[in-house]
Image: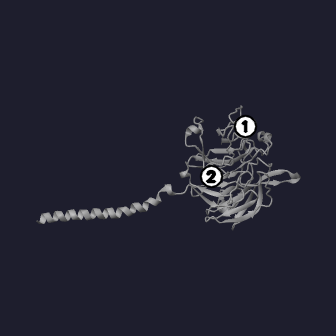
Amino acid sequence: MNKIALVISGVFLLGVLFLLFLLSSSPKQEQTQPQKKENAPKTQVIATNLDTPWGLAFLPNGELLVTERQGNVKRIDQNGNVATVATLSKVQEIGEGGLLGIALHPDFSKNNFVYFYYTYSAAGNDTLNRVVRLTYKNNQLSNEQIIVDAIPGASNHNGGRIKFGPDKNLYITTGDAQNPSLSQDKNSLAGKILRVTDEGKPVPGNPFNNLVYSYGHRNPQGIAWDSKGRMWEVEHGQSATDELNSIEMGKNYGWPEIQGDEEKVGMVKPRVHSGANTTWAPSGAAIVNDKLYFAGLRGQSLYQVSLNSDRIYKMEQPLEVKSLLQGEFGRLRDVVLGPDNMLYITTSNRDGRGSPAEDDDKIIKVNPKLLQ
């Protein structure tokens, strides 16, 4: 009888333990369900009511500096509060021109230098562009110094993107200023990608002993570097045939001699273009996890290009351009990678060519892991 009792007691104890296991495991499953990554938002608007924001730059504390084409520099804190830091008085918003690109010095935490590209009116009513450097302290900008001056300008085709590259030199995209022949003139600053030191001097080793790094460009507005230090650029074509180029020092990218699939000895055709009947109107560009993203104005999309194959760089594999967020936010101008590995894009619906909503323009945070 004692053996039977022990068996019964053992069976009862196992049953109790099994019941306790079921009760303890169920709540854990319920708690983990809301933490699934697919429930995270793909896009989130973080700022509204801006006026044609053109460039973005993250401060070390996670706040954003934003340029508005009319000349304002605004600061956006991590709660989405917007404040005006400064208005650059010499900026002239002319057509596509105005206050455009922005870049922080690689040693910003030590020197507090911020660089800007803007359009201005010179003597004789000439429209020109320049790059300047200011000091940012206590949420204020001061001590403007000209770094590169007298870049040809016009109401359209001013380029305007500035970024420090992996070599810590400053790269500047300039448009042809509506004078296509300037793009082929290696002594002109128009229709080029320039490479300068942080003081605006020619970098030793520049191919033509001046500021020019590459030439034959029409209206480049986006540059980015991949994980191997290779430079990519997007630019506006004529009517269509917008371009994505792999940039090499000293190369001629053909404008106005060639466009699209046209070829000419000594000139580099684009790695991919939008075609004769489609336009991207590309602007800012960023690269994350071997994917290039660039903003589309007339295309009203965030475009994605995979760069994850060595065959791409050997020209053995064509590039595929995917259109994302098509029409969701209208015209898109800039895209940058944030310190949180999210993409941040600006709309450009108040630039005179869009259909702005009441709360335009916006800055939108995009989770690249959720883009399809």
Tell me: residue 132, above or below residue 263: below
Horizontal side of residue 186 vs 24, given as left or right: right
**Residue at screen point 75% across, 51% down:** 201
- The CA distance from mark 2 to mark 1 is 34 Å
- Could you tell me if the residues under marks 2 and 1 are in contact, i.e. CB atoms within 8 Å? no
Question: Which amino acid lies under the numbered mark 2 shown in the image of this protein?
Answer: Glu
Residue 102: quadrant of the picture: bottom right
Numbered disc 1: secondary structure: loop
In the displayed structure image, the side of residue 298 where residue 146 appears, left or right: right
Q: What is the image's colouring? A: one colour
Residue 328 is marked as 2
Q: Identify the mark nearer the N-term, 2 or 1.
A: 1
Q: Quadrant of the N terminus?
A: bottom left
Residue 335 place in picture, x, y as percent: 64, 52
Relative image position of residue 257 (x, y in whole percent): 75, 35
Q: What is the three-letter code of the residue carrying label 1? A: Gly
Is any atom of residue 16 visible in this view? yes
Mark number displayed over residue 212: none
- Specify whether 339 is left or right of 186: left
How many residues crowd around disc 1 within 10 Å: few (fewer than 14), some, or many (20 or more)?
many
Q: Please report the residue visible at 63 percent of the width from the left and 62 percent of the height from the top.
A: 63
Q: Which residue was labeled with disc 1?
A: 254
Residue 226 in view, yes or no: no
Residue at horizontal 20 percent and vertical 63 percent from the top = 10
- Judged by depth in the image, the label closer to the viewer, 2 or 1, is 2
Spot the residue most to the left: 1
Q: Secondary structure at mark 2?
A: loop
Q: Residues within 10 Å of mark 2 (few under 14, many from 20)?
A: few
Residue nearest the observer in this picture, 188 or 176 = 176
